């Protein structure tokens, strides 16, 4: 497998430094990508870089995942209009632990010579004094060179300006590359296209400081076909951590991808080969309403991030809301998963003591909750056979609900018609 060619046909390649492809074709190369530790989880925006490392390793090369324990204390100005808040060392360590655990799901850390390796730049920066840094690093890169970078020019010409802290970021990242080149034989740095300036500073430092050769590859920044930002929803980032984004919501994110985006994403975010993808595209184009591409994409990526069991649960969750899975499915979910499943669905809280007394269905749906705006409307729809609780049609306006009716001892699921759900929580 040719790594660069793999990136090309998948539509991932953006820039490549002359000589890089020739180097990669000679034999095993060590290369790295840096990951930002501003949270204790990566989000789907990080997946393109993770996929780059996966393809790099599959092509027989040795991937390094650098977590920026030191650079996280500074903050990368690339693509940002203002300076970020700096993190404490304790917060950084917590975030690093979470990110490491996630990366270990994707890369093989025990496969011989090209085993993946995790490094933290805090390890080589923690005892590096300021005077040593400006003497050993700063003297090799001119201010003119640094000022020419787009990430610097855009900020200096903007409203907020740029602090010295951020200005030095490209030197800090450049030294990362130098350190890994010197100590781990890392000849290649990869990253998103917004990182080209920082990466090239590293290759320049290696050349000027030790007359060495190093190389760079960047990948396309992921955008949606409609121009909006990838990886964001109205609720915020889509995280890889199931505590931050449930596997059901994660699955739905990919399933709800537009046709145009699905054709792009299935190349970038899955490991399907070209023949398989082109076959899926033909099948999808024959019957777009079946969402063949979206289902294949959502399945592959949900299983790789969360596992087969959580994927199956996500499918059942979808079928519960939109299909024929029975109410007993809710008993398989914990409280957080139930709440996540009904996110965006109107929910109401009632007292458990009310349930213990026994509550009439009309009062439950029109007084203690607002499923119906009035008792009259509740009675009318119940009598018309259009209302259900826990997926059982309500047959009489005189029905009474007690704790025995609660799912997991906490929940009632009310329906008006087939698709209008309401979650009632007793506590």
Image (cartoon, rainbow, N blue to C red):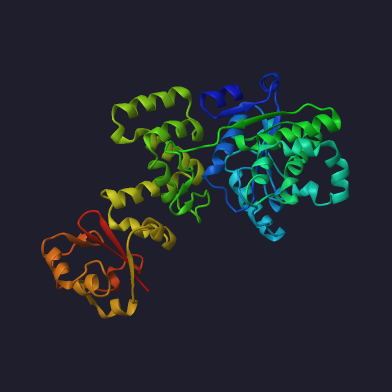
Left or right, residue 56 beside residue 134: left
Q: Using the image, determine if residue 253 lies above or below residue 373.
A: above
Left or right, residue 185 beside residue 226: right
Name the image quarter holding the C terminus.
bottom left
Q: Using the image, determine if residue 97 lies above or below residue 182.
A: below
- The picture places residue 343, in percent across and down from the top left corner, at 38, 58
Name the residue nearer the viewer: 170 or 411. Answer: 170
Q: Answer with the quarter of the image where residue 296 lies.
A: top left
Q: Is residue 77 visible?
A: no
Name the image quarter holding the N terminus.
top right
Q: Using the image, determine if residue 155 lies above or below residue 274.
A: below
Name the residue nearer the viewer: 360 or 144. Answer: 144
- The picture places residue 424, in percent across and down from the top left corner, at 31, 67
Q: How many marks?
A: 0
Residue found at x 85% / y 31%: 210
- The picture places residue 141, in percent across and down from the top left corner, at 81, 37
Residue found at x 43% / y 25%: 276
- The picture places residue 257, in percent across and down from the top left corner, at 40, 40
Name the residue nearer the viewer: 126 or 397. Answer: 126
Q: Is residue 383 visible?
A: yes
Q: Answer with the quarter of the image where residue 295 lies.
A: top left
Name the residue nearer the viewer: 98 or 70. Answer: 70
Left or right, residue 399 beside residue 126: left
Q: Using the image, determine if residue 351 lies above or below residue 162.
A: below
């Amino acid at each position: 497998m040719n790594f660069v060619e793999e990136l090309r046909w998948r539509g991932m390649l953006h820039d490549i430094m002359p000589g890089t492809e020739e180097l990669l074709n000679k034999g095993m190369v060590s290369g790295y990508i840096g990951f930002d530790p501003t949270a204790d989880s990566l989000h789907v925006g990080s997946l393109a870089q993770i996929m780059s490392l996966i393809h790099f390793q599959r092509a027989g090369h040795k991937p390094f995942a650098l977590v920026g324990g030191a650079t996280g204390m500074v903050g990368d100005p690339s693509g940002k209009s203002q300076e970020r808040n700096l993190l404490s060392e304790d917060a950084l360590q917590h975030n690093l632990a979470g990110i490491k655990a996630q990366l270990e799901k994707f890369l093989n850390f025990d496969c011989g010579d090209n085993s993946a390796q995790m490094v933290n730049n805090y390890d080589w920066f923690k005892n590096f004094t300021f005077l040593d840094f400006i003497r050993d690093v700063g003297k090799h890169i001119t201010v003119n060179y640094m000022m020419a970078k787009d990430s610097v020019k855009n900020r200096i010409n903007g409203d907020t300006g740029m602090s010295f802290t951020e200005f030095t970021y490209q030197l800090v990242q450049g030294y990362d590359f130098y350190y890994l080149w010197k100590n781990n034989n890392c000849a290649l740095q990869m990253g998103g296209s917004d990182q080209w300036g920082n990466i090239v500073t590293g290759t320049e430092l290696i050349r000027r400081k030790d007359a060495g050769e190093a190389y760079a590859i960047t990948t396309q920044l992921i955008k949606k076909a409609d121009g909006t930002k990838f990886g964001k929803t109205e609720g915020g980032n889509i995280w890889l951590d199931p505590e931050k984004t449930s596997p059901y919501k994660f699955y739905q994110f990919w399933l709800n991808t537009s046709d145009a985006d699905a054709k792009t994403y299935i190349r970038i975010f899955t490991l399907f080969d070209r023949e398989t993808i082109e076959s899926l595209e033909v099948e999808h184009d024959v019957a777009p309403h079946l969402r063949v591409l979206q289902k294949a994409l959502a399945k592959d990526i949900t299983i790789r991030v969360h596992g087969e069991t959580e994927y199956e649960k996500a499918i059942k969750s979808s079928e519960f809301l939109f299909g024929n899975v029975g109410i007993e499915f809710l008993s398989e979910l914990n409280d957080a998963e139930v709440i996540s499943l009904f996110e965006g669905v109107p929910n109401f809280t009632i007292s458990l003591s009310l349930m213990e007394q026994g509550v009439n269905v009309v009062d439950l749906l029109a007084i203690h909750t607002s499923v119906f705006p009035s008792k009259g409307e509740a009675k009318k729809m119940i009598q018309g056979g259009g209302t259900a609780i826990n997926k059982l049609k309500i047959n009489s306006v005189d029905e009474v609900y007690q704790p025995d009716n609660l799912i997991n001892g906490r929940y009632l699921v009310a329906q008006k018609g087939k698709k209008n759900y309401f979650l009632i929580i007793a506590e």
